[in-house]
Image: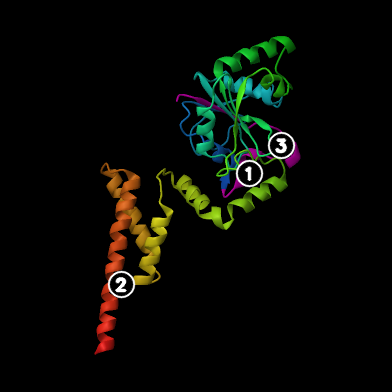
Amino acid sequence: MIFDAVILAGGGAHRLGGVDKPALSVGARALLDRVLDACPDARTTVVVGDRRPTARPVLWTRETPPGRGPLAALGAGLHETTAPLVLVLSADLPFLDRPTVRALLDAADGDGSVLRDPDGRDQPLVAAYRAEALRREIALLATEHGSLRDLPLRALTAELELTPVSVTERAPLASFDCDTWEDLAAARARIREHGNVLDEWMTAVKNELGIDVAVDTKTLLDLARDAAHGVARPAAPLTTFLVGYAAARAAASGADPAQAVAEASRKATDLALRWAAEADADAQKGGSG
C-alpha cells in the first residue's frame, strides 16, 4: 500500500515550558524517532517542524509563519506529499507501533481512518487520510477563512467520513501522547516495566546500531542460559556475541537475517548442550569410580 507520512513536530509544547518536545527521550530514544520507527514504509516522510537529527532521512518543511496551529502545519506537510493515502501523526507518541499504523492504513475507506482511544475519543493526529479528501477540505477551509492559521483540527475532521480504529488490547497505549512532564515520566516508567523492558531495549539497540532484523528474544535467552549453565557464566554474553557475528556473516552472503540468527542460535545451543552432557558424563564416571 503506497502512502506518505506527515509528522507534526513544530508545536509550542506550552505545558512543557516550551522545550523541544520531539527531542525528549523515552527509553533513550527521541519521541520523534519512535514515531518514525512506526512508519518505515512511507514512500515520503515529511516532518513539519525545525530540522534536527533523526534516525532516518526525512523531508523537512514548516508552515508560514511557524506556530500557527496543527491545521496550518498539516497543510504545509500535505503540500509535500504525492501518495493517494497520507498518514498523519503527532511527534509525541512513544508507544505507537507498526501494527497500529498498518491497521489504520488498511481501514482507510471513505475519507480515511482515525485511531479511537480507550476513552472513545477519536485522535485526528493518529489517522490515515485519503489525500484527495484532505486536499479538498483544506482548500475549502483556507478559502472560507482566508488561511489555515489557528484553525482547530475539528474544523477539518467534522467534514470527513473517517472509519474509527479502536486501540487493541495488545497496544492499548498507541494513542498515548506526552503533553506534560507527568506524561513523559509515565511513559518512561512504562517501558521499564518487566513485561516491556526487553523488547524496548532490543529495539533501542537495533536503532542505535542501524540494524533492522527480527530477533527471537526467547531463543537467545535460552541459548544464554544453556551456555551459562553448561559451560560457565561468562560464556553467555560471549556466545550470543559470536552468534550475532556468525549471523551477520551469513546475511552478508545472502541468507535471510532472521533465519541466520535462528540457525546460529540452534547450532550454539546444541553445542552448549553437548558440552554440558559431556561434563555430566565425566562427573558420573568420577563418582562411580
Mark 2 vs mark 1: which is more N-terminal?
1
Image point (57%, 36%), residue name:
52
The residue at which mark 1 appears reads as 24
Tag 3 residue: 13
Find numbered disc 1 in the image and state the secondary structure of the residue it sits on. loop
Residue 260 against residue 117 in the figure, above or below? below
Residue type marked 3: Ala
Mark 3 Cα-neighbour bin, 10 Å: few <14, some 14–19, many ≥20 = some
Real-space Cα distance between discs 3 and 2? 57 Å
Mark 3 and mark 1 lie on one chain; the one further toward the N terminus is 3
Q: Position of residue 240 (x, y in %)?
A: 37, 59
Q: Amino acid at mark 1?
A: Leu
Total numbered circles: 3
- The residue pinned by badge 2 equals 276
Disc 3 vs disc 2: Cβ atoms closer than 8 Å?
no
Question: Is 176 rendered above or below residue 228?
Answer: above
Q: Which badge, 3 or 2, is on the more N-terminal residue?
A: 3
Q: Quadrant of residue 251?
A: top left
